[in-house]
Amino acid sequence: MPLWTCEQCGAQFPETAEPPAACPVCEDERQYVNWNGQTWIAREKLAQRYKLVWRDDLGIPGISMQPGFAIGQRALLVPEADGCVMWDCVPLATGEGIDYVRSLGGLKAIAVSHPHYYGAVADWSEAFGGVPVYLHGDDRAFVTRPHSAIVPWTGDSHRISDDILLVRTGGHFAGGTILHWRAGAQGKGALLTGDVAMVAMDRRSLSFMYSYPNYIPLNATAVHRIARAVEPLAFDRIYGAWWGRNIEANAKAAFEMSVRRYIAAISG
């Protein structure tokens, strides 16, 4: 039986003879159903029509799909001595992509910022022996393909290693998560934010939204909570959700300025 992927958001669903009736990720007000109606693609056809590409993104290897598919995010591979941590995920795993990750030392874990980027986490985990997939438990209702590798962590932080800490900020989703990489940016520290905190096109600032495609801003309480979660962390660089959408240096000052600017803008 086919394993189905939503063509609008990239969420993967279990094997069934017929595609699911609906995608709960797209039906949520933070996303949207395609204007022409819900559509699906079987995993085998997805692999025939698309490929994975990889390159360095400001010192971290990354993977994305080509041509662009669904939301279009890239996954980052944070290197450690005992394997990489995949941050966020793409909706496809191919033999060539898996071989590329093996060439970097393989995967020891997967962590995802929020449900829009869950993608093919189960396939990637299985390719590396069932490595844990860390998703915040507050967002478990959006897991569309349950799997034994999924670890629904709880609370405000979860440490993967000495240098890698997951921090729940909330905001975009209740379980919205960022990754703090202490060894990043030549030891000055880096944040990987997905679009829980969105790197703006000027690459000198960030913004915050409840829904990006539907233009629903976050309220001040939620943004202050994100700021409190980030405040204790030391970092000089921020990696966003798409190729090149990064703040290379002085990122903590940029983050703090962005919070002030955002609060002022929505406060009138």
Image (tube, rainbow, N blue to C red):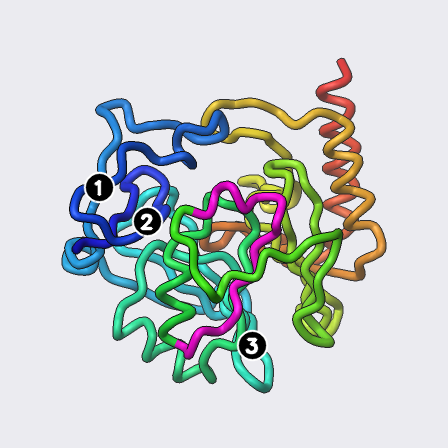
Q: Earlier in the sequence, mark 3 or mark 1?
A: 1
- Disc 2 marks a residue whose amino acid type is Phe
- Disc 1 marks a residue whose amino acid type is Pro
> In the image, is 168 to the left or to the right of 17?
right
Q: Residue 227: percent from the left, percent from the top?
A: 78, 42
Rounded to the nearest whole Å, what is the CA distance between mark 2 and mark 1? Answer: 9 Å
Q: Earlier in the sequence, mark 2 or mark 1?
A: 2
**Residue range of the region highlighted in magenta in the rendering:** 128-143
> In the image, is 205 to the left or to the right of 32?
right
Quick one: SS at disc 1? Answer: loop
- Disc 3 marks a residue whose amino acid type is Pro
> In the image, is 180 to the left or to the right of 42?
right
Quick one: SS at disc 2? Answer: strand
Rounded to the nearest whole Å, what is the CA distance between mark 3 and mark 1? Answer: 37 Å
- Rendered position, 246 above or below 116: below
Which residue occupies the extreme top position in the image?
A: 268
Q: Quadrant of the C terminus?
A: top right
Q: Quadrant of the N terminus?
A: bottom left
Q: Residue at x 68, y 60 (%)?
A: 166
Q: Residues within 10 Å of mark 1 (few under 14, many from 20)?
A: some
Q: Do the numbered discs 3 and 1 sit on residues whose CB atoms are within 8 Å?
A: no
- Rendered position, 131 above or below 242: below
Quick one: SS at disc 3? Answer: loop
Q: Do the numbered discs 2 and 1 sit on residues whose CB atoms are within 8 Å?
A: yes
Q: Residue 48: percent from the left, percent from the top?
A: 14, 59
Of the numbered discs in the image, which one, if any, rests on residue 79? 3
Q: Which residue is mark 1?
A: 19
Q: Residues within 10 Å of mark 3 (few under 14, many from 20)?
A: many
Of the numbered discs in the image, which one, if any, rests on residue 13? 2
